Amino acid sequence: MMPEPGTSALAAGDRQLSVADARAAIAAALKPIAGREVVPLMQALGRVLGEDVLSPIAVPAHDNSAMDGYALAGAELRANEATVLRVVGTLFAGTPFAGRVGPGECLRIMTGAVMPEGLDTVVPLELCRTEEALVWIAPGTIQPGENRRRRGEDLAQGRPALHAGRVLRPADLGLIASLGIAEVNVMRRLRVALFSTGDELRTLGQALDPGCVYDSNRFSLMGALQRLGMEVIDLGLVRDDPAALQATLESAVAQADVLLTSGGVSAGDADYTRSLLGRMGEVGFWKVAMRPGRPFAFGPLRGDSQARWLFALPGNPVAALVTFYAFVREGLLQLAGATPDPLPVLRARCTHAIRKRPGRTEFLRGRLAPAGDAGWEVQITGAQGSGILRSMSEANALVVLPHEQGSVAAGEAVDVWIFDGLV
């Protein structure tokens, strides 16, 4: 239910929130957006599974050979002398065996072939000695039952193969296909309206007037949203004008689940921003103890039947992206019905000394590389100002110095978020 406008339960007042507290507050406030659809398996990559995938078959469907070798009855194996068996045929995967294997006999069998009745053991080709139609197996070479994959060993019929909330990956599509399933039930894509605010911003193709800059945030954030599989509604640029901002917010609320903005949330911004958002919902303006970042706004705006969630990011390009990774990414996955995996954290040796005071979380752009037997090392990528997007582009990871962390000595291990893991 949409909260009544007024004093926000999400407001933090003048105190600074830690990154951990801000993340916890967002997670506690959000619930998945309703709505599911059925899509062909070939279109399901990156989608969020809407219900458990139950296996209609046992996997494997039959006992089968785990390798190329000779299939035999384990009871034939002798303990103190070589076992000698006659080869009475060859069995390939996908080919049924119509004959019968009697005492003292075996079959040459290929990986994946169904084990004939009465045979329960496969001895690898390289562990046998063969001569004409006979196979010699030395004592102790193999135990009865080895190298046989049992029916239902991977997945029993009727059991969940994948659980609801999973973001489908390539291997998942292969698993579903192996069950003979052509369509899957997925959560509908989350609709995210995106815009940037500021009179100084110009869009691509416009002349760059004195004191103005091209808007980069929409393109960075649009790419981050697309990697998450979101449906992006690009609302362009919005002037620092109450009427323009209200019109854009009303348009976004009418067509999106989430509003993602950059700029217009710092303490120096006009009072109309806060009053307008206060009339439309219950947005909290936060000061987060982090660098880059700090100003951040979050909360629900009134929609038709459910809240539309607003994430308002700072305007500096690096700060906008870092804040997206720190707070928005997992929030969007949660709204989309996914079970977000924790951000992948790697420990790496930092090649630089870093000065830091405890009391805030700092994110630095870094270049992660293997360091041989020493594991991984990370090098800071140049100037770390919140408006220097080039050093963000040159980086492949973020060095994360937690709230309580002090200065870092060269060679000391630090936490690292890998960019390619932030999807």
Image (cartoon, grey):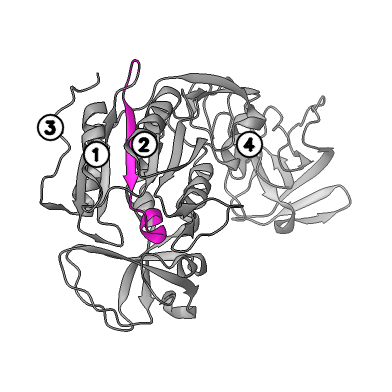
User: Residue 76 at x, y = what percent?
Assistant: 66, 41
Residue closest to the far left: 14
Q: Residue at x 74, y 45 (%)?
A: 70
Of callouts 4 and 1, the N-terminal one: 4
Residue underneath mark 3: 7
Of callouts 3 and 4, the N-terminal one: 3
Residue 174 disc label? 4
Tally of marks: 4
Per the rendered image, the range of residues in magenta is 304-321
Asked if the magenta segment contains residue 313, the reply would be yes
Q: CA distance from mark 3 to mark 4?
A: 50 Å
- Residue type at mark 1? Tyr
- Residue type at mark 2? Leu
Of callouts 1 and 2, the N-terminal one: 2
Residue 272 disc label? 1
344 or 277, which lies in front? Answer: 277
